[in-house]
Amino acid sequence: MRTTSLPSDAPASPSLTVRRLRDRQSHDPADLRAILDEAIVAHVGFVRGGHPLVLPFLCGVGDLGDGAVLLLHGSTGGGLFLDAGAVGVPVAATVTHVDGLVFARSTFDSSANYRSAMIVGNATVVPDGFRAEALRQVADHLMPGRRDEVREMTAKEVRATQVLQLPLDRASVKIRAAGVGEAVDDGEDHAVWAGVLPLAVRAGAPLAGDISGDSPVDGSVRATAARLDELAIGREARIAAVMRPTPA
């Protein structure tokens, strides 16, 4: 159903081992899946004409019958989709969530809390027979419940849209979820505040289109906003637990 082998002229797959701050690398598939489950945009790097390019794609995690894949949404006329051709195209796709800025008492020691994933492999065009299902899975990933509130895609809309699929078997995950590095005897000026400023994607108030009139906001919109808030609250709770552990 999907091609996993690289084209014969593709470069050798790079090492995915983190060389610096190796303790931040995670090999837990659950961490990779959690990062991708929250993803809205994946930045995809590839080489065209000998020059590296990176493009953003709306994305989703789906399964078309051969295991979980990253689905990249675009147009049938999109350059990367044309590059993929019949055999696929080597890419590196990244997803990053910045969970906080870490303010230390020097800029050198300052940092960020983040969760990042890089997936390398051969991105292939979803076969025509699975394209509609791939588009449904992307929609369900980005806007859960929305398909139950709107009409089904037309055949023309499906033909105008395309999806690339990228297997998840070659991935590197790196995570920092910690407080600020400090000690009573570190010689820094402790009158300067140090700590973590949590960051998260939150939803603003829904803005109706010009002809929506007094139509109520649909449940999928409200649910998406609530989910983003829940994720943000969960991130703040986790970092607070790291910085101020519960006494034993």
Image: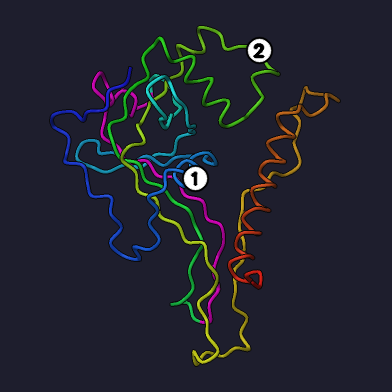
Q: Which mark is residue 35?
A: 1
Q: Position of residue 39 (x, y in %)?
A: 52, 40
The answer to which image quadrant residue 102 occupies is bottom right
Q: Which mark is residue 208?
A: none
Which residue is the extreme one toward the front? 248
Residue occupying image coordinates x 31% and y 40% = 170
Give the residue type that dot 1 points to.
Ile
User: Mark 1 or mark 2: which comes first in sequence?
Assistant: 1
The magenta region covers: 78-105
Residue count near mark 1 (Cα–Cα under 10 Å), binned few <14, some 14–19, many ≥20: some
Residue occupying image coordinates x 63% and y 89% = 191
Q: Position of residue 164 (x, y in %)?
A: 38, 26
Horizontal side of 90 relative to 93 (left or right) equals left
Secondary element at tag 1: helix
- Single out the mark in the foreground, 1 or 2: 1
Give the residue type that dot 2 points to.
Arg
Q: Where is mark 2, residue-wise?
A: 151
Horizontal side of 164 relative to 38 (left or right) equals left
Q: Position of residue 132 (x, y in %)?
A: 48, 14
Secondary element at tag 2: loop
Residue 42 higher or lower than 233, as above or below? above
Residue count near mark 2 (Cα–Cα under 10 Å), binned few <14, some 14–19, many ≥20: few
Q: Position of residue 108 (x, y in %)?
A: 43, 77
